Amino acid sequence: MSETDNKPTLGRKPLGLKRSVEAGEVKQTFSHGRTNKVVVEVKRRKVIGKPGADTASESKAAETKAPETKAPEAEAPAPAPTPAPAPTPAPAPEAKTEAPAAPAPAPAPAPKADAAPAPEAKAASEPEAKAPPAPKPAPAPAAKAAPAPKAAPAPRPRKPAPPRKGPPGETPQERVKRLQREAEEDRLRMGEENRRREEEAKLQAIEEEKRRAEDNRRAEEEAAVKAAADAKAKAEAEAQAKAEAEAVAKAAPAEDSKPAAATPASDNGAAAPGPRRFTPVKRPEPARKPEGAGAAGGAKPAVAKKGGAPARGAERKNDRRQSGKLTVNRALNDDEGARARSLAALKRAREKERRAQFSGRSQPREKQVRDVIVPEAITVQELANRMAEKGADLVKALFNMGMMVTVNQTIDQDTAELLVEEFGHNIERVSSSDVDINVDSDVDAPETLKPRAPVVTIMGHVDHGKTSLLDALRGTDVVRGEAGGITQHMGAYQIKTKGGDKITFLDTPGHAAFTQMRMRGANVTDIVILVVAADDGIMPQTIEAINHTKAAGVPMIVAINKCDKEEANAQKVRERLLEHEVIVEAMSGDVQDVEVSAKTGKGLDELIEKLLLQAEFMELKANPDRNAVGTVIEAKLDKGKGPVATVLVNRGTLKRGDIFVVGTESGRVRAMNDDKGKQVKEAGPSMPIEVLGLGGVPMAGDVLTVVESEQRAREVSSWRQEQATAKRTATAPASLDTMFSALKAKQDVIEYPVVIKADVQGSVEAIAAALHNLSNDEIKVRILHSGVGAITETDVSLASASGAPIIGFNVRPNAKAREQIEKSKTAMMYYDVIYELTEEVAKQMAGIWGPEKIETVVGRAEVKQVFPAGKKDKAAGLLVVEGAIRKGLHARLTRNDVIVSATTIASLRRFKDDVDEVRTGLECGVVLADTNDIRAGDQLEVFEVSHRERTLG
Ligand SMILES: Nc1nc2c(ncn2[C@@H]2O[C@H](COP(=O)(O)OP(=O)(O)OP(=O)(O)O)[C@@H](O)[C@H]2O)c(=O)[nH]1
């Protein structure tokens, strides 16, 4: 009731022939002195069963005003029927009877709403027909509007009957207040009632469900019990004799009666809800109902039809009837459990399905054939990973092939191929050429080639004057600076002749231990100068040098040195060279020879001339305009400069800033020094330079290649490192045979372990090679570790753990290592001359090996007869056939040339007399120590054992 609504009606009478509503003015007082007047209309209640124009109009008026909640006032004028409509809200029968009288209370559930308006409409239509036209429009919409759409506000108009009349002296304002209060109370009460009813319905439904479940369970149990009883009874019936047939016959009706009893039970069950409704299959169906719930009962018959079973439709009707009205809440509650459960169940079901599908697929999974990339060496585990197989399976397969390997061991490409094929995959072999730089295939076009300086190597026996000659050629003197007067490691120098030609010299050492380095020198060398001292002639290393030069296919110039000496005999040298197929020009051959003296400088110019002539003849050329390719002549770890390498550029030009790969290392040219120690920005072909900026110390002989980017350099170097590691750790797959033979070999061979540390890589290699040369079948040098630089703690711990000495060549231990050496008493061997080192090691090895055992046969005899001697022993009657037999000597008894026992002569007798010696042709009796296995016809060899100091090398 709003003020604005009421104002226009003020003083205006409602339309109609007769006033059906009483209107009164009420003055309202507000704060600040404001007042307002409102019209209060009071409806009259429609009287049932007393047709008449008044009643009809009243009912119409009541219907029109119903929504405005002014109904309560209708009670005042309306006489009798009031008590009846009071409890109207719910029950259907009441609604039906009360409907005509009730002011369109429109109960909530649709079916009732449908039912209610029908009679109402009829009741209304009759009076309407008689009624004057004016009020027509009002009742018509009222009749229609009442039922469905106004179902929601329906509870409001249903007010309780109680105190409808106010106190006698009630003012209109008090009356209004009272009415409002009453209306509010009614509304609250109605709400409370509704809530209670809904709760009751809910409880009832739950109980119902429980009951049904219980019934269902009971029915199932009963059925199971009955089935068991049936089976028993039948079995008994068959087993029993005819006499018991009657009992069986009785049992049979009993059985019949039981099902009969069961049927009603099941009927009851069906009459109730029926277990099917609660089966997991049926549950999801009601979940759809909420969609149709808005359409209220409209959907219900459809469900009944879908159910197919008329019994179920009946059940539902019964349910509904028993549980009262179907409210929105109830409808939702019905679905609530199903929905909540269905969501979770749906998830679980999907998950289960997915798992089932997954597991179903994995079991009969098809074997996937893969293309397996296999490098030259690969670990079993890595191969297994690439094949997507189990490492253990590979090990098993290898075992079946007779190879005993673990997953961490490295196998070669061929073995890997066998495995890959065994497992049904395809192998893709990858070789180093796929990643590595192949310098050989990179050939320069002839037009790009330009003349270059010859690279000359000087070879010869120790002290024949190689360094002196080179020195003389360079005009410098480095001889005095060398330890022991021997060139220890390779150096490279370039000289410029008077004519401006350049010649590069590699100064290779003359000692045999440096053979490997010399071989490398020969590989980059264009021409070899073979230095032979005229006074000493051809020596072992001279011959070795000749052989290496020939093997390398490098032309040779013989420099017969020390010709200034009196005892010099150049001709003898030439003649002796013939023995080694070196025919010099003077002997009508093609090998140039020069008589020189490093000391006096005699013949040096002639030597240079002949070198240039040879170089010219060879047409030495290289392309200087390309990325450099060089060879490491020597490399070391310099304290101040870091890793430093002496590189001879083979082709191209090496520039400062170039990125390169050298062996397993990579780097960028930080600086370059020439042989005079001068910094240079670039170095062309045949130029030896010292390169700084390496990532590590490369090996002598490694090839340096300039690459386009750091990334490429890293890629190549890491690949090479990988390969080097794989090769180092690669073990030939061990078969059972090789395993046992290796064990046997280990027992037979004495190992001499050492740790080698040297100042430069070349020395390390030279020492290693020299020590390996000392090894023989019985004693072998085993290099535990070798490296460049000072002796460190780790070297000491490694050596002491293996009881090995540390060989330090031109290096000393650092402070910490010294402490540890003292503690662990590790043997140290310091040298600065290689041959001293090898001699000393040879001595030590001989010491470990022990003195040599020498056997000298003294005599031989034949066993003629065997007879007992004492309680246990046997004596042999012998005939000495050779030498003599002496008491206490070592003896070896052989039968058909097979040694039966190795023993000693315990006693020697001749005609019952103990004697010390029996000579050839005489007979004697002997008792052998520790053996009685003697037979007539056996041979006895008697020998002496002596020991002699061993020598190695
Ligand atoms: N009289 C004479 N002595 C020479 C001549 N050339 C070298 N010598 C001496 O021979 C000795 C050895 O000379 P080196 O130049 O060290 O000989 P090397 O072949 O380099 O020796 P290693 O470095 O040990 O291989 C030195 O004492 C030189 O002085 C020569 O032409 N005449």
Image (cartoon, grey):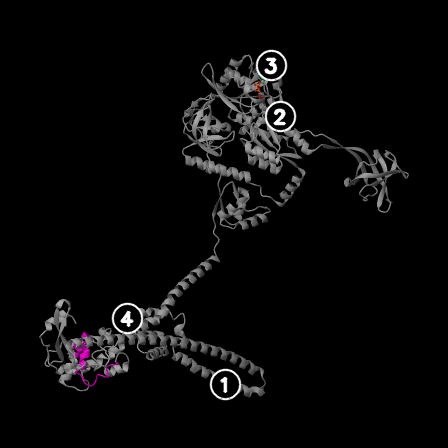
Q: Amino acid at mark 4?
A: Gly
Which disc, if any, is residue 836?
Answer: 2
Frontmost residue, 182 versus 259: 182
Q: Is residue 590 visible?
A: no
Alpha carbon of mark 1 to alpha carbon of mark 2: how far? 120 Å
Q: Residues within 10 Å of mark 4 (few under 14, many from 20)?
A: few
User: Which residue does the numbered mark 3 point to in the structure image?
Assistant: 570
**Magenta segment:** 62-87
| Image vertical order of residue 104 relative to residue 378, above or below | below
Query: Where is residue 937, by image quadrant?
Result: top right
Alpha carbon of mark 1 to alpha carbon of mark 3: how far? 140 Å
- Tell which quarter ligand 1 is in: top right
- Closer to the eye: label 3 or 4: 4
Q: Quadrant of the N terminus?
A: bottom left
Q: Secondary structure at mark 2?
A: helix
- Closer to the eye: label 1 or 4: 4
Q: Secondary structure at mark 3?
A: helix
x and y percentages locating residue 718 in the rendered image: 47, 37
- Closer to the eye: label 1 or 2: 2
User: Which residue does the numbered mark 4 point to in the structure image?
Assistant: 294
- Closer to the eye: label 1 or 3: 1
Q: Residues within 10 Å of mark 2 (few under 14, many from 20)?
A: few
Q: Is residue 79 magenta?
A: yes
User: Which residue does the numbered mark 1 point to in the structure image?
Assistant: 254
Proximity of marks 1 and 4: CB atoms separated by less than 8 Å: no
